[in-house]
């Protein structure tokens, strides 16, 4: 073979190696409980998640109603009964994504598996489902912190999957999505200009109807809201007790701790489970360090 042609072929192969994804083995779901969809130049592949955050349902304080709703739906799903896709929406740091991870830790032994998919990769839902539709496990396709602009390709695919009119996931797949927005789309004052009254009922304009149409396809909405100050302090107290028990120590719940917890939330501009956990970790850590 001509030496110059050989060198050209080598350069072409080297370029292809940079574009093509590395070969990956098929996931053994018997030992792998979670996976991520990793996008590459042409499509993507499922990559196993080697370690899962060690969070359990009992670790989530102040959201008992939300936990009950999502857990009951998941148990129906695992039992082979009718169940719904879920939209978990609300304030940041209130436990939406932690709740899904806690479900996996609680129910992996009952064949629950989770596949995390980035919002922009939802266009690959058909490929993802094809990977798992014949598996003897129940899969939650989980997309975290989702928001769209109308017309995005991922928006259209998710809408189609939830509606089932063109593409419907199999019976062993549900979709759980978290978002800070109830309708997954930005809402503007101008959206309401097309509203009208018909026989005493409000009929939304086209802009609002389009935004409601996606979230309305989720069978269950679970809302998460900021804690009141009393709720926040209760969660702080419970986290301090839990961290102290884990560390084999005690920290007295006092007016000083309460005031410091309030100040911490004020500086963060937020009262949520995440903020409560951060303060409890800070306070208990300080006490343990002082006693060392």
Image (spheres, rainbow, N blue to C red):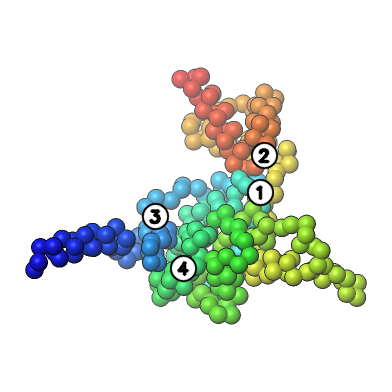
Of labels 1 and 3, earlier in sequence is 3
Q: Which mark is residue 124?
A: 4
Q: Name the residue under label 3.
A: 49
Mark 3 surroundings: few (<14), some (14-19) or many (≥20) residues within 10 A: some
Q: Is mark 1 on a helix, strand or loop?
A: loop
Q: Looking at this view, is 43 or 272 the one in front? A: 43
**Picture coordinates of residue 291, whole percent (x, y):** 49, 19
Instruction: Answer with left or right where residue 259 lies relative to residue 159.
Output: right
Of labels 2 and 4, earlier in sequence is 4
Q: Which mark is residue 270?
A: 2
Above-or-below relation of 58 to 80: above
- Which residue: 61% across, 38% down? 275
Q: How far apart are marks 4 and 1 (CA)?
A: 28 Å
**Picture coordinates of residue 183, whole percent (x, y):** 67, 61
Q: What element carries label 3?
A: loop
Quadrant of the image containing the N terminus? bottom left
Of labels 2 and 3, earlier in sequence is 3
- Asked whether the beta carbons under mark 4 and mark 1 sit within 8 Å of each other, the answer is no
Q: Name the residue under label 1.
A: 91
Mark 2 surroundings: few (<14), some (14-19) or many (≥20) residues within 10 A: some
Q: Which residue lies furthest to the bottom in this view?
A: 165
Q: Which of marks 4 and 1 is in front?
A: 4
Q: What element carries label 4?
A: helix
Above-or-below relation of 247 to 93: above
- Asked whether the beta carbons under mark 1 and mark 2 sit within 8 Å of each other, the answer is yes
- Asked whether the beta carbons under mark 4 and mark 3 sit within 8 Å of each other, the answer is no
């Amino acid at each position: 073979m001509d030496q110059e042609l050989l060198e050209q072929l080598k350069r072409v192969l080297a370029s292809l190696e940079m574009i093509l994804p590395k070969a990956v083995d098929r996931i053994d779901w018997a030992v792998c409980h979670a996976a991520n969809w990793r996008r590459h130049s042409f499509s993507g592949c499922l990559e196993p998640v080697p370690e899962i955050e060690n969070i359990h349902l009992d670790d989530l304080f102040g959201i008992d109603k939300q936990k009950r709703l999502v857990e009951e739906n998941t148990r129906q799903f695992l039992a082979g009964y009718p169940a719904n896709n879920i939209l978990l929406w609300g304030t940041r740091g209130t436990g939406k994504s932690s709740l899904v991870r806690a479900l996996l830790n609680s129910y992996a032994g009952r064949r629950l598996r989770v596949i995390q998919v980035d919002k922009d990769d939802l266009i690959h839902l058909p490929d993802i489902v094809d990977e798992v539709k014949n598996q003897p496990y129940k899969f939650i396709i989980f997309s975290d912190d989702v928001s769209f602009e109308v017309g995005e390709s991922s928006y259209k695919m998710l809408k189609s999957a939830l509606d089932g009119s063109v593409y419907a996931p199999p019976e062993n797949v549900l979709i759980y999505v978290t978002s800070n927005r109830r309708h997954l789309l930005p809402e503007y004052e101008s959206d309401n200009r097309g509203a009208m009254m018909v026989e005493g009922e409000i009929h939304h304009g086209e802009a609002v109807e389009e935004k409601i149409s996606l979230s309305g396809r989720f069978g269950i909405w679970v809302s998460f809201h900021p804690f009141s100050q009393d709720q926040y302090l209760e969660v702080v107290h419970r986290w301090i007790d839990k961290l102290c028990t884990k560390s084999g120590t005690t920290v007295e719940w006092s007016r000083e701790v309460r005031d410091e917890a309030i100040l911490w939330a004020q500086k963060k501009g937020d009262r949520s489970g995440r903020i409560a956990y951060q303060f409890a970790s800070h306070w208990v850590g300080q006490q343990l360090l002082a006693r060392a």
